[in-house]
Image: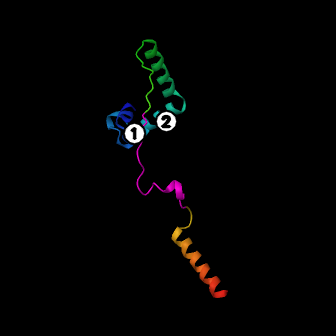
Amino acid sequence: MLWRLRTGGPWRDLPERYGPWQTAYERFARWEADGTWAHSLEQVQVRDDSAGAVEWTVSVDSTISRAHQHAADIRKKGRRRGTNWKIRHARRLVRRWAVRVAG
């Protein structure tokens, strides 16, 4: 399980020396569900905090990154959903033409 957390690799790539990946995954999922991981983290934090080994300073990065040039207008125009906008536009033109012909 530590291999998976350290490498970020998929469970299927777990080295054979650790046994079947399905077993490791099921155990990991069971421990996550029953709170074993959260409890372990809490115990380590309490132990290290009491020893003065934890620095509880928080740092927030306020880096701003620009959106892609094509995404810049999404807030202004809104995202088009549903029917393709070209189809909707063509339908409007047909309706206008039909009104003129019938008119």
Locate residue 68, reporting x and y percent: 41, 53
- In the image, 18 versus 84, the foreground residue is 84
Compared with 90, 20 (above or below) is above
The residue wearing badge 2 is 29
Measuring from the top left, give residue 15's x and y in whole percent.
32, 38
Instruction: Tell me the quarter of the picture where residue 70 sits.
Output: bottom left
Q: Is residue 40 left or right of residue 14?
A: right
Q: What residue occupies the far right of the structure in this picture?
A: 103
Residue 93 appears left or right of 22 = right
Q: Is residue 70 magenta?
A: yes
Q: Residue at x 39, y 38 (%)?
A: 20
Q: Residue furthest top?
A: 51
**Residue occupying image coordinates x 49% and y 35%:** 29
Neighbour tally class for label 2: few under 14, some 14-19, many 20 plus, Cα within 10 Å = few
Q: Nearer the viewer, mark 2 or mark 1?
A: 2
Comparing 38 with 23, the one in front is 38
Circles 2 and 1: CB atoms closer than 8 Å:
no
Instruction: Based on the picture, tell me whether residue 2 belongs to the magenta stretch.
Output: no
What's the magenta region? 61-80
Mark 1, secondary structure of its residue: helix
The colour scheme is rainbow
Where residue 33 appears, x then y in whole percent?
54, 33
User: The disc labelled 1 sits on which kind of residue?
Assistant: Trp
Amino acid type, mark 2? Ala
Q: Which residue is mark 1?
A: 21
Using the image as rendered, state which of residue 34 and residue 72 is in the foreground.
Answer: 72
